[in-house]
Amino acid sequence: MQDWGNGPSSEDFEKKVIEIKNHFKNKFGQQKGFLPIVIIAFLILVGGYSSMYEVDTEETGVVLRFGEFHSFAEPGLHFKMPLGVDRVYLVQTGRVLKEEFGFRTVKPDVRSTYTKRGLEEESLTLTGDLNVSDVEWIVQFQVSDPFKFIFRIKDPVGTIRDIAEAMVRKAIGNANVTEVLTTERALLANEIQVDLQSTLNNYDIGVRIVTVKFQDVTPPDPVKAAYNEVNESEQQRESLIFQAREQFNREVPRARGEAKKVLQEAEGYAVERVNKARGETNRFLALLTEYRKAPSVTRSRIYLETLEEVLPRLDEIYVMDAQNAGALPLLPLRKALEGGAK
C-alpha cells in the first residue's frame, strides 16, 4: 500500500533511539546513572516532535490508531499519539485532480508544453467501422472519501486510469470514425463519464468524476490529409443546412402570413357580398309585400324614389307639357349660348 503520510514511522524512531543509545553508551559507558536520563530526555523530545503534524488547506488527514481508522483531520496544526501509535495519511480532497491520456504535460506554466512521445499505444484507438483515430483526453476527479481512496484498493489512481481507458475504448469502439472526429464527440464524453462514475461507485473507492473531456481527436498522420478534407466537407454541409433552415424559417412564416391575409380578405369579401345580397333580397321582398297591398301607391312611391335618385345626376331638367310641342326646337338653345359665350 502506498504511504500517503508525512509523520515519522515507529521503525525510524526505534533506529534513532538505538543509535543514540549506543553513542551515549560508548561515550558514557562508565556513568551508568547518566545514560537512562539521556535516553528518557531524548524519548520525550522525539515523542513531542512526532506528536505534531500539519494538514494543508487542500488536504484531509486520515488518522489511524493502532492500525485502525480513528478520525479525519481538517486543515491546520494537530496533535497525535507519538511513537507510531497514531499514523496520519494526507489526501488532497480540496483539489480537482487530473489524469492525462495520450499526452503528458511537460512544463505546466503560462505556456505549457506537451509531449506524445512513447504514448502512441495509449492514444491510438480503433473505431466501430475498423478505422483508427488518435485520441487525447483527460479525466478530472475529486476524492470524496479519503479513507476509502487510500485503503479500499492498492493503487487508486492506476485503477482510475485503467477503467477510464477501458471506457474510452469501449465508447469509441461502438461509434464510427465520423462521429468520433466530428459530431458526436461531446456525447461520447458524457457517456464515458457516466459509465466511469458507475464503475467506480461499484468499486467504492470514494472518487467523484468531475469531467471527461477529449482534448484532441485526429486521424493518424498517414491519413490526416484525407480526413481533414472529410471534416471540411462535413462542416460545409452543416453550414449549408443551417443556411437552409434560416431561409426556411424566414420565408415559410412570411408565405403563411400572406396566405392567411388573402384568405381573410376573401372571407370578408364573401361575407360582405352575402350580406349585401341578403339585404337586397329582404328589400325586394318588403317592396313586393307592399306592392301587393297597394299596387298604385307602391308604383308611385317607387317612381318618385327613382326620380330622387336619378334627377340629381342631370345637368338640366325640363318639365314638358304633352300638348305644348313648340318648345322642342328651343331645347338646345342654352347649350348653344353657353358655347358661344366661351
Image: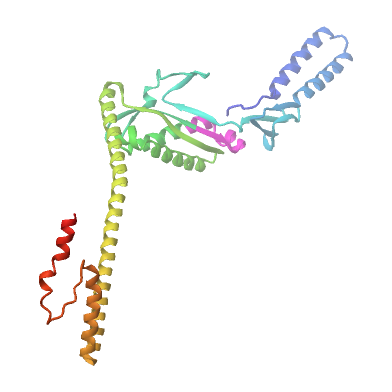
Asked if residue 158 lies in the magenta stretch, the reply is: yes
- Position of residue 192 measured from the top left corner of the image (x, y, whole percent): 42, 38
35 versus 2 height, above or below: above
Q: Position of residue 196 (x, y in %)?
A: 46, 39
Whether residue 51 sits left or right of residue 168 in the image: it is: right
> Does residue 337 appear to the left or right of 227 in the view shown?
left
Please give left or right for residue 334 compared with residue 86 in the image: left
Q: How many marks?
A: 0
- Residue most extreme to the bottom: 293
User: Which of the 4 image quadrants contains residue 94?
Assistant: top right
User: Which corner quadrant of the image does residue 23 belong to?
Assistant: top right
- Residue positioned most to the top: 27
For the question of whether residue 290 can be seen, the reply is yes
Residue nearest the observer in this picture, 37 or 148: 148
Instruction: Identify which residue, 17 or 129, lies in the foreground.
Output: 129
Query: Which residue is drawn at the image coordinates 77% and 13% (left, top)?
Result: 20
The percent coordinates of residue 76 (x first, y second) are 72, 29
Q: Is residue 7 above or below residue 22?
A: below
Magenta segment: 140-160
Most foreground residue, 332 or 279: 332
Residue 169 lies within the magenta run = no
Q: Splitting the image into 4 quarters, where does residue 305 fall?
A: bottom left
Residue ID at (27%, 76%): 279
Q: Is residue 128 visible?
A: no
